[in-house]
């Protein structure tokens, strides 16, 4: 099942950081994509830019328990990025379920099985029946970010 999300830009400036960037919808190497570009800075305790979207337009949890994960195609500048999911069980902005991926300068398929997501700063197990938000982040080091994604879909490998 394809997902078409309304991406928004979020940066460390919400916490005093100075990273800059933007999210655009554009054609990248012949494919319509959402693209995150910018400069990640560690100044002022910063260190991230992201494109993020609620799965439900009203921010309510979405039941993805019939699916085993997500897949998408990524194109970028050869840097490492993170996919992060948030569920209704998480109460702090730094909590998430995450997976790193590399975005090479050619369209490449990324598969993110829910069972392989790493819980970050939470003891709550990942509950696919309560997914609220998805993010693609450039994070953790100073660098020029450029990552595009398209073909975001749910994996239907569960019986």
Image (spheres, grey):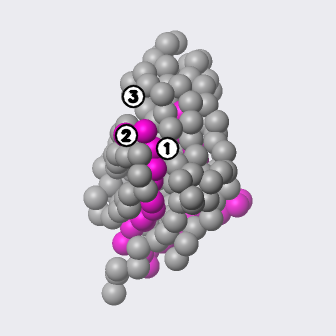
The dot on residue 147 is 1
Q: CA distance from mark 2 to mark 1?
A: 9 Å
Q: Position of residue 8 (x, y in %)?
A: 66, 45
Binning the other alpha carbons within 10 Å of mark 1 as few (below 14), some (14 to 19) or many (20 upward) gives many
Q: Residue 69 versus residue 143: which sits nearer the camera?
A: 143
Q: Which residue is mark 3?
A: 140
Structural distance between the alpha carbons of marks 1 and 3? 15 Å
Label disc, if present, on residue 112 of the rendered structure: none
* Image quadrant in which the C terminus is located: bottom left
Q: Residue at x 67, y 51 (%)?
A: 25
Q: According to the image, label 2 marks what residue?
A: 78
Magenta residues (range): 49-78
Q: Secondary structure at mark 1?
A: strand
The residue depicted at 56 percent of the width and 19 percent of the height is: 17
Q: Between residues 128 and 1, which one lies in front from this camera angle?
A: 1
Residue 125, position in %: x, y? Answer: 34, 57
The furthest residue to the front:
30
Q: Residue furthest right?
A: 58
């Amino acid at each position: 099942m394809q997902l078409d999300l309304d991406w928004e830009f979020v940066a460390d400036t919400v916490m005093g950081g100075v990273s800059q960037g933007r999210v655009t919808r554009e054609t990248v190497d012949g494919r319509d994509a959402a693209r995150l570009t910018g400069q990640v800075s560690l100044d002022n305790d910063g260190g991230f830019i992201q494109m993020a979207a609620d799965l439900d337009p009203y921010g309510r949890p979405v039941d993805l328990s019939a699916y085993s994960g997500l897949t998408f195609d990524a194109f970028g500048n050869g840097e490492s990025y993170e996919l992060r999911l948030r569920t209704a069980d998480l109460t702090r902005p730094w909590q998430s379920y995450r997976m790193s991926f590399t975005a090479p300068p050619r369209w490449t398929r990324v598969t993110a099985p829910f069972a392989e997501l790493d819980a970050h700063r939470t003891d709550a197990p990942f509950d696919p029946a309560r997914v609220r938000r998805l993010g693609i982040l450039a994070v953790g080091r100073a660098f020029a970010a450029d990552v595009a994604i398209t073909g975001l879909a749910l994996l239907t490998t569960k019986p």
